[in-house]
Amino acid sequence: MATKLPATDVVVVGLGWAGSIIANELTEQGLSVVAFERGPWRETARDFNIASAPDELRYSQRQELMLQTAQNTVTARNNPSQTALPMRSWGSFHPGNGTGGAGNHWAGITFRFQPEEFRLKSHLTEKYGAGAIPAELTLQDWGTDWSEMEPFYTAFDRLAGLSGRAGNLKGQIREGGNPFEGPRSEEYPTGPMRQPYGPTLFAQAAKELGYKPFPVPSALISEAYTNPLGVTMGPCTFCGFCTNYGCANYSKASAITTVLPVLVRKSNFRAQTNSEVLRVTLDATGKRATGVVYIDTSGKEWEQPADLVIVTAFTFENVRLMLLSGVGTPYDPETQTGTTGRNYAYQTANNVQLFFDDKNFNPFIGAGALGMGIDDFNNDNFDHSGLGFFGGGSIRVTPIGAAPIGYRPTPPGTPLWGSEWKRQTVKNYLSSMSIGCEASSYATRTNYLSLDPTYTDRLGRPLLRITFDFTQNDLKMSQYCTDKVAGIAKAMNPRQFVPHPMTGHWNTGPYQSSHVVGGFVMGADPKTSAVNKYLQSWDVPNLFVVGASAFPQNPGYNPTGTVGALAFKAADAIRRLYLKNPGPLVSA
């Protein structure tokens, strides 16, 4: 039996970007907030000081900042006819652990989604006709639009101090920015980052081909910046230890560098770390959340009652908690009924590797969100008539830093070890580069999340089961976009270039992206969505579920900026609407 604690106003589950933003906004309203985090408390000065942060073995190879599979894992399969098996080590994606979540080890690329993405099904139907959308896809509108989202994107930009150049400022297209983005109300808080040789060379070739290159929007800030909460950050030093690492320089925006230093000092906030939430508790009607039950490091269970429950964990845990707590109806791929687990989507990773004889890229100079990109072949920025697919990708060169263990570029046919492998490593280390294309992944009927009927975690709870494979739509899109990347590579005149489009079935082994989305999606119809446009549960009005789990499908962009915007959006709705009149904010 769980020991019952005194009630609080708000419980927040997960202290990454979304949880930290919402907790801060609600404590500003005067509410008492208790936030739960499964992992430890993390802070820059102690955990990521300059003497220990740049450790490839510790952080990239042994994945110290990631959730350990002994704590929790998932099972995976490609289709419903298969038996899912547990992931024994994280390969395909890297869930975070501890305060700051995956925002501690993220790369920092921070796009806004385009206006059309929030009404994707309607947009494509209006432009191409309903019959043009492949039958395998279950595309959905988000139930919100650009006018509602833009102010909250701006709030996140200010909080993180994002670096870049606006390509569409109040409807005016500006040279040097991304002309395909939605209209911004403000310029980026800090200017674009200085570009090293590889991105500069790529941008020059892309421009000569008629494309429109721009600096990748970055949460690794280009100059000293103090955000609206009074937290000061320093400029990026291009150290090359960013993706998979915490930032020792206070340059990479994350919850621990932008929000938590302020939040933790508030008397009406308490962080309960090393505490795993087991379920959201409901009253006898099942229509009201009463709090959460969690377990501490000693194995003791506690019940924390609350008037308002906000779940802001990683996509997998958001959905799993809803399934374990009996919130909503589990999705059935046969009948396509139920919404909990529906519309799980991933991202398709493609690239072209280039080998030169006459270039020196100094690849150890880098950062997770440093580079130049084009959006000419992203989303619906190009005509899809007759192509047989929809979607696209963000094409960019982002040198993250060539760590000595992981970065060993060799051309095809090179042995995997021995003297020739060593010779090719030396020959190509300084003179190779890659053009990436992080592309969309659209939902289909048989890609979904559910509870595994066989495998359980250390506490006896069913693991989350992933049923996913790349659709034919996504594979056709990947080949098309990679061919476009290869055209840019050819124009750069390398000795050799090697295209790598996404092909075949999804494989859990190699790392591809942590951009997993969907499973508890937002929308305007309770029959096809789990939360409304304010991230409020249709079934349990005092429960909000915020994160990438709300995305009905995944466009060709990184999700974090949109997660941050949704967090501000949900907090605003709670402060402005829900607290004045608790109950459903949208009529079902």
Image: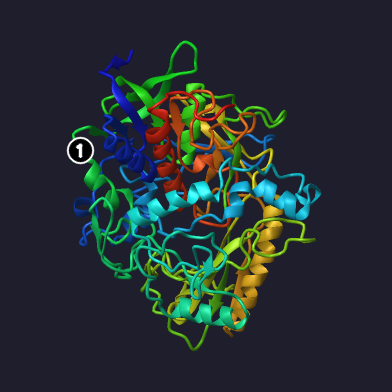
Above/below status of 394 relative to 105? below
Using residue 351 as the reference point, say whether residue 581 is left or right of it.
Answer: left
Above/below status of 251 relative to 290? below
For the point 49% across and 23% down, which residue is it? 540
For the point 57% across and 57% down, which residue is it? 556
Location of residue 264 (image quadrant): top left
Using residue 379 as the reference point, say whether residue 182 is left or right of it.
Answer: left
Quadrant occupied by the C terminus? top right
Q: Position of residue 99 (x, y in %)?
A: 30, 43
For the point 39% across and 35% down, which residue is it? 576
Give the residue at the far top of this rendering.
Answer: 284
- The structure's colour scheme is rainbow
Decide which of 583, 111 is in the foreground and name it: 583
Q: Is residue 301 visible?
A: yes
Decide which of 210, 100 is in the foreground and name it: 210
Give the residue at the far bottom of this rendering.
Answer: 358
Q: Position of residue 554 (x, y in %)?
A: 58, 49
Q: How many marks?
A: 1
Using residue 42 as the reference point, say whether residue 325 is left or right of it.
Answer: right
Q: Is residue 456 visible?
A: no
Label 1 sits on what residue type?
Lys
Above/below status of 430 relative to 549? below
Q: Label 1: how many residues lie within 10 Å, few (<14), some (14-19) or many (20+)? A: some
For the point 69% across and 34% down, which residue is it? 81
Q: Which residue is tagged 1?
A: 266
Location of residue 352 (image quadrant): bottom right
Quadrant occupied by the N terminus? top left
Q: Position of residue 195 (x, y in %)?
A: 41, 76
Q: Element under label 1?
A: loop
Decide which of 344, 455 is in the foreground and name it: 344
Q: Position of residue 304 (x, y in %)?
A: 31, 21
Using residue 356 as the reference point, say whether residue 367 is left or right of it.
Answer: left
